[in-house]
């Protein structure tokens, strides 16, 4: 330890003796380590850290697997059979989220509701902070209506009232008794639920086995593997299919871990980001390695003196490693500060879909351990070569009193050149990945959503079925809202729709065209399905291509009608006119006449393929949920208060929520893609800068080492152009080698980006060629500056004897 402390003190003195070298090395390491720290913080929070529940690895979600998709809701009778017949689960609970109206207070509000079986809180193993959870039987029809609220609702809505347990709250027009308050730390990751309600109160609950309305969350028994639980449920599902062939013949089972489901959409992007910052760190290490090699060459006489005085090779190597580890630890400390700043930056620019729980992302002990480990590994990575190579100096040459300071050996020169080649190759890989993502983002942004998103204000509401039980009452409410809103000064038009584009609300239906043969059972074609009023297409700016839109005559007493989109018209009537054709729908169950064709609209994502879409009028198919759309003459959000007041003029107890612009929804749909592209662009810029600095440093060092040689050449008549060409050739050989290796590596690695790309292939020739050219030009500039300086060497100064 005494020797170690002596080495450390000496190392610190040597680092302080060369402050310029130390500053450049520390900053280089800080950038590489800081970027890795920030990205690893996210990876740790979202991919590695277990969910905040006891034995969270035992929590799974179970779905029905049908021909319509691998993850479908389950019918409530199927859920009951699964729970009763399975033996792999300690607990199994029904689960569904749906917003509910909270009234009876000063102002109506919309809160997130979670409908669950009575054993749900036992399943997640979390006890209420105050009061109790649900009791057996409280999830059965006819039981007393009770609710458990979360800590945030208790604080924000009720001011933390200590007498809250036992109070009544009005949800969807019905009184519920609050029996418990959840702890502040409790958040169920599927949704930010504010009030938990027994499943029997779920509005969409159906006892019909053919109606899938139920999500299923379960806890496996200790020691049970997910494959075993899945196999057991598949056996039960097969038995149900044999017993109920009309409803269950097409139903299998899909079981997945709760955490696996939560991160499956962001895992590829985060791993790609982690790999990218790893490459940036390697480039930084190569830079620092080159700096250390150059510095070690200048210390050969010092090393020779120490060897002559009895220092062993191991002792000298240990001194070198101690200095490099000190440098890496200082760089790691600075990198930690960069990581903190970077994490704040990531929080500020990240979309909610990527970082849903920002509070969970922090520099905890795991992240600090990662940073320390990376710092030590980088120290060993760039310090081992100088320690081994220069721990055995040539004493005669190094101590020759009349000789020059020993120059760089051929082997050392090869190492430095290899490091530059690797920098160029790694930088090219990062740049090409970034280029592909940026090009993909540009292609996505070129996609026409099918409507005009500017100046559109949107908000959602759900009217209580207990207050508006009849379809006519529901439609009359929507109609009155639109009429009141249209009277507001500054409103150009208004409409209601069930599934607003890019809001996450959508539906589908099976259909049959009555102008052709009936499809075989189970092979009915599918279409997106939406409900809208007569003003929807005009308000959204969706073009009418053929026929007509909905009108006042399309009411409950008239013939059912629908409007289809252009993709459906082209697919099923490529040479004909669909207007006048009758179509039978499964959801809603109607037979309607096609009266018009409108342009295609992107419903979920901009990169979704166009598919058939059917619109039915709200007036003929009333529903309790609606999204209000308002096209304004001024800033849409400035009209929010007046529009909300118009809704309250129809019903003072009707809450509204998700007040936002259509443009914000459109922007949010590309948020994750833009976030990844921005980060990759940032990291590629850092990689390009580090590579350029590395090339510049090596060429500058080479010119300095060859000053004597260049002076002789110029004294013998070499012109500046020849000197320039000689130095540039040295740099270009390294650059071309790096480009060749980088292109081959990129060709092999970019296929991992394929799931994140749109309208761009992973081996896009334009991107590969353009990025390689860009890197070559930057590298040429980095070579040219020291090469130009070499042409200005004064032969008399260069030839002067030391």
Image: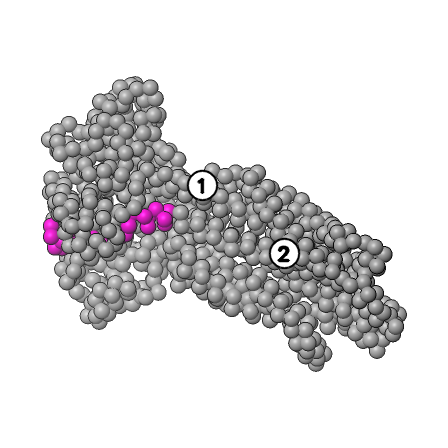
The quadrant holding residue 351 is bottom left
Whether residue 663 is in magenta: the answer is: yes
Q: Is residue 253 visible?
A: no
Q: Locate residue 388, reporting x and y percent.
A: 76, 64
Q: Residues within 10 Å of mark 2 (few under 14, many from 20)?
A: many
Asked whether the residues under the numbered discs 2 and 1 touch, taking CB atoms below 8 Å apart as contact, a structural biologist would say no
As helix, strand or loop, the secondary structure at mark 2 comes to: helix
Which residue: 41% across, 40% down?
A: 446
Tell me the quarter of the image containing the N terminus: bottom right
Image position, residue 225 (x, y; %): 46, 49
Q: Nearer the viewer, residue 63 or 278?
A: 278
The residue at which mark 2 appears reads as: 692
Q: Is residue 725 visible?
A: yes
Q: Work out whether 126 lies above or below 619.
A: below
Q: Viewed as shown, does residue 165 lie left or right of 663?
A: left
* Residue position marked by numbered label 1 in the rendering: 443
- Which residues, given as a range, are shown in magenta? 647-669
Judging depth in this view, the residue of 636 and 121 nearest the camera is: 636
Instruction: Using the numbered discs, state the Cα–Cα distance from disc 2 to disc 1 in whole angstroms.
Output: 30 Å
Mark number, residue 22: none
Left or right: 694 with respect to 96?
A: right
Q: With 44 as the anchor, is 692 left or right in this view?
A: right
User: Which residue is painted at 22% across and 22% down in the image?
Assistant: 580
List x then y, in percent, for residue 750: 56, 44
Label 2 or label 1, whichever comes before in sequence order? 1
Q: Magenta span has 523?
A: no
């Amino acid at each position: 330890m005494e020797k170690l402390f002596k080495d450390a003190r000496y190392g610190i003195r040597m680092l302080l003796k060369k402050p310029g070298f130390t500053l450049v090395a520390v900053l280089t390491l800080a950038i590489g380590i800081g970027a890795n720290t920030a990205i690893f913080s996210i990876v740790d929070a979202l991919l590695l850290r277990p969910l905040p529940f006891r034995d969270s690895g035992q929590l799974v979600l179970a779905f029905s697997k049908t021909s319509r998709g691998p993850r479908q809701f389950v019918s409530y009778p199927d859920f009951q059979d699964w729970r009763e017949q399975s033996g792999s689960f300690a607990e199994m609970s029904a689960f569904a989220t749906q917003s509910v109206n909270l009234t009876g207070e000063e102002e109506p509000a919309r809160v997130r509701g979670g409908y669950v079986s009575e054993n749900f809180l036992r399943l997640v193993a979390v006890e209420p902070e105050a009061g109790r959870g649900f009791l057996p039987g409280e999830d059965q029809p006819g039981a007393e209506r009770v609710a458990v609220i979360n800590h945030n609702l208790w604080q924000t809505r009720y001011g933390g009232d200590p007498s809250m347990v036992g109070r009544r709250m009005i949800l969807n027009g019905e009184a519920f008794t609050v029996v418990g308050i959840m702890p502040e730390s409790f958040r169920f990751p599927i949704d930010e639920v504010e009030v938990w309600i027994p499943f029997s109160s779920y509005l969409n609950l159906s006892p019909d086995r053919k109606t899938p309305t139920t999500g299923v969350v379960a806890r496996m028994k200790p020691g049970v593997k997910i494959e075993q639980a899945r196999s057991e449920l598949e056996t039960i599902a097969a038995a149900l299919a044999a017993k109920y062939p009309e409803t269950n013949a097409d139903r299998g089972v899909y079981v997945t871990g709760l955490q696996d489901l939560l991160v499956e959409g962001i895992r590829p992007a985060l791993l790609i980001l982690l790999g990218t910052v790893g490459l940036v760190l390697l480039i930084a290490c190569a830079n620092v390695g080159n700096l250390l090699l150059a510095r070690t060459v200048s210390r050969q006489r010092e090393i020779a003196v120490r060897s002559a005085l009895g220092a062993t090779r191991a002792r000298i190597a240990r001194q070198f490693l101690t200095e490099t580890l000190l440098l890496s630890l200082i760089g790691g400390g600075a990198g930690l500060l960069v990581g903190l700043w970077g994490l704040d930056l990531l929080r500020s620019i990240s979309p909610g879909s990527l970082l849903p729980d920002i509070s969970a992302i922090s520099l905890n002990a795991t992240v600090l351990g990662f940073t320390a480990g990376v710092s030590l590994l980088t120290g060993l990575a760039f310090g081992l070569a100088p320690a081994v190579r220069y721990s055995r100096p040539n004493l005669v040459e190094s101590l020759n009193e009349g000789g020059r300071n020993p120059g760089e050996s051929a082997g050392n020169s090869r190492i430095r050149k290899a490091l530059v080649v690797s920098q160029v190759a790694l930088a090219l890989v990062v740049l090409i990945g970034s280029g592909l993502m940026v090009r993909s983002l540009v292609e996505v942004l070129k996609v026409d959503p099918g409507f005009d998103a500017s100046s559109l204000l949107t908000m959602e509401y759900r009217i209580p079925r207990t207050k508006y039980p009849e379809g006519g009452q529901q439609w009359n409410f929507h109609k009155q809202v639109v009429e009141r809103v249209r009277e507001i000064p500054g409103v150009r038009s208004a409409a209601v729709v069930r599934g607003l584009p890019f809001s996450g609300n959508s539906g589908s239906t099976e259909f049959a065209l009555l102008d052709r043969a009936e499809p075989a059972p189970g092979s009915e074609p599918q279409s997106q399905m939406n409900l809208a009023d007569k003003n929807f297409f005009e308000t959204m700016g969706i073009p009418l291509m053929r026929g007509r839109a909905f009108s006042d005559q399309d009411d409950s007493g008239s013939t059912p009608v629908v409007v289809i989109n252009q993709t459906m018209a082209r697919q099923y009537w490529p040479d004909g006119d669909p207007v006048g054709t009758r179509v039978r729908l499964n959801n809603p169950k109607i037979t309607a006449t096609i009266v018009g064709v409108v342009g295609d609209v992107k419903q979920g994502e901009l990169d979704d393929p166009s598919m058939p879409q059917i619109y039915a009028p709200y007036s003929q198919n009333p529903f309790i949920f609606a999204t209000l759309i308002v096209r304004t003459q001024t800033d849409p959000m400035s009209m929010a208060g007046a529009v909300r007041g118009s809704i309250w003029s129809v019903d003072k107890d009707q809450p509204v929520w998700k007040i936002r612009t259509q443009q914000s929804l459109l922007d949010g749909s590309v948020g994750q893609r833009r976030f990844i592209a921005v980060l990759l662009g940032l990291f590629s810029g850092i990689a390009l800068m580090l590579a350029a600095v590395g090339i510049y440093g090596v060429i500058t060092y080479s010119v300095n080492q060859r000053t004597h040689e260049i002076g002789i050449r110029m004294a013998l008549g070499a012109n500046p152009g020849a000197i320039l060409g000689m130095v540039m050739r040295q740099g270009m050989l390294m650059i071309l080698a790096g480009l060749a290796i980088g292109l081959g590596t990129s060709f092999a690695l970019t296929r991992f980006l394929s799931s994140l790309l749109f309208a761009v292939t992973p081996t896009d020739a334009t991107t590969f060629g353009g990025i390689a050219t860009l890197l070559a030009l930057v590298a040429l500039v980095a070579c040219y500056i020291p090469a130009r300086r070499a042409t200005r060497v004064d032969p008399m100064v260069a030839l002067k004897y030391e």
